Amino acid sequence: MLPLGLLNAAIGHPMLVELKDGETLNGHLVNCDTWMNLTLKEVVQTMPDGEHFFRLPEVYVRGNNIKYLRVPDEIVDLVKEQQQRDQASRGGRGGSNQRGDHHGGRGDRGRGDNRGVVRH
Amino acid sequence: MFTTAAQLLDLTDKKLLVILRDGRKLIGVLRSWDQFANLVLQDTIERVYAENEKVFASVPRGLYLVRGENVLMLGEIDLDKDDYVPEPYREESTNVVDALHRKEIKEQKDKEKSTRAKLQAFGFEGELAGEVMF
């Protein structure tokens, strides 16, 4: 499971996000995308000095400002379950190949970064 | 495949020391990574050092998702040597080390500030005004 898969599995769970400037955001993950942009709710924002706090009902974070995320340990188990469910719904066989299942005749050659590739 | 990606593949499910650009040292098991070197670390602890006093503390932190850009370096930990603490270092309680660590950071920040001020007096404009790593 890729890191962003883990992030997806953490939707609805509480987490701590530290930004590059040292601010931390404590809140529940509402949604995220492939650029690691996040929306959080019920957030407590802590300034880099660790002494000033703000309560924010809703926050949008642009992914590039993130240093790291700390998520609950249980998310790992959740990801495993989700993976098994996905595999079952795909009919068992061929479920494990996360790569190489292109739909068109030609792959995504010639594009330097494959950030946009959807893996289903 | 990129050689670097192959190396990360070798490190998967191994215990690693990851140093972030802000100087943080994380020790955990690498469970997953992607093309940006975003990392998933499990059972992570943070090592905090007070370099002047030669003491350190380990803070349990749990599951991390580190955004690749912020990684400075990482390396596998030799489990046979993991418990060995070299002289003159010793482990101390988190509270003690944390206070000393903060003090050292503050002292260094102050020093950088005065260096900048002195350089500025000679007409040197902010060569270090950008990102200072530690």
Image (cartoon, rainbow, N blue to C red):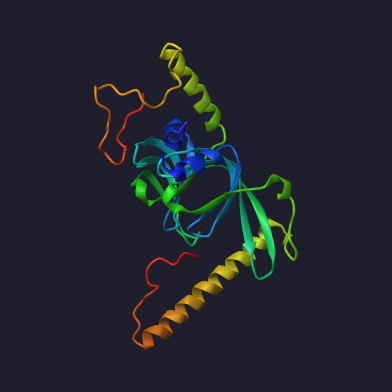
Rendered position, B50 above or below B121 = above
Compared across the picture, whether A37 is left or right of A76 comes to left
Left or right for B70, reference B93: left
**Of residues A54 and B3, which is closer to you in this image?**
B3
Residue lying at 61% horizontally and 65% vertically, measured from the top left = B101
From this viewpoint, is residue A12 visible?
no
Disc count in the image? Answer: 0
Q: Where the C terminus of chain A falls, by quadrant?
A: top left
Q: Quadrant of residue A47?
A: bottom left
- Looking at the picture, tell me which residue is in the foreground, A10 or A55: A10
Q: Residue at 41% across / 14% down in the picture?
A: A90
Q: Is residue A22 left or right of residue B47?
A: left
Instruction: Tell me residue B61's x, y (percent).
Output: 59, 46
Percent from the top left, x then y, of residue B108?
Answer: 53, 73
Q: Quadrant of residue A107?
A: top left
Residue extending furthest toward the top: A91
Q: Position of residue B116 (x, y in %)?
A: 42, 79
Q: Is residue A69 visible?
A: yes
Coordinates of residue B27 in the picture (x, y in percent): 60, 48
- Against B81, is A92 above or below? above
Left or right position of B10 against B99? left
Query: Image height check: is A44 above or below A75?
Result: below
Q: Quadrant of residue B62?
A: top right
